[in-house]
Image: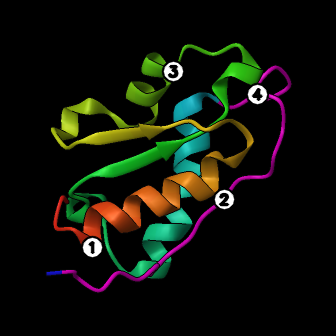
Amino acid sequence: MERKVAVIGVGQTEYTSIRKETRSLVEIAFAAISPALDMAGISLSDIEATVYTSVDGFEGVVRPDRTRDAFGQGWNIPVISVNTGGTAGGSGLKEAVHLISAGGI
């Protein structure tokens, strides 16, 4: 049985090269996540899983380290990493919809 899925909050940071960024990866992630949580009216403790996307290859960043830093594995929740190059954002949203709709999250 498919479950209904909706986007209930969004957040984004201004695009910049990580080479020019002065904030840590955790600070960047927090800057994007906070508005989405506020818009949705939920907190970090309500999150059951995350779908993480970026184009780290263009920035020369090691993905597993960035993922752990950004979303803190201490939460003990699944972190699904999607990287399809320049289409990562759209692919990540599509993956999240499929996982939720199918009851995988």
Residue at the image point whose x is 45% and y is 17% from the top: 65
Q: Secondary structure at mark 3?
A: helix
Residue 69, horizontal then vertical, whole percent = 43, 27
Residue at the image point whose x is 31% and y is 40% from the top: 79
The magenta stretch spans residue 81 = no
Q: At label 1, which amino acid type do we have?
A: Ser
Within 10 Å of disc 3 (Cα), the crowding (few <14, some 14-19, many 20+) is some
Residues in magenta, as a range: 2-23
Within 10 Å of disc 2 (Cα), the crowding (few <14, some 14-19, many 20+) is some
* Marks 2 and 1 close (CB-CB < 8 Å): no
Of mark 1 and mark 4, the one earlier in the sequence is: 4
Q: Is residue 80 left or right of residue 39?
A: left
Q: Which residue lies under the disc numbered 2?
A: 12
Q: Which residue lies under the disc numbered 4?
A: 22
Vertical relation: 27 (above or below) 50: above
- Where residue 32 sits, quadrant-wise, is bottom right
Q: Which residue lies under the disc numbered 3?
A: 63
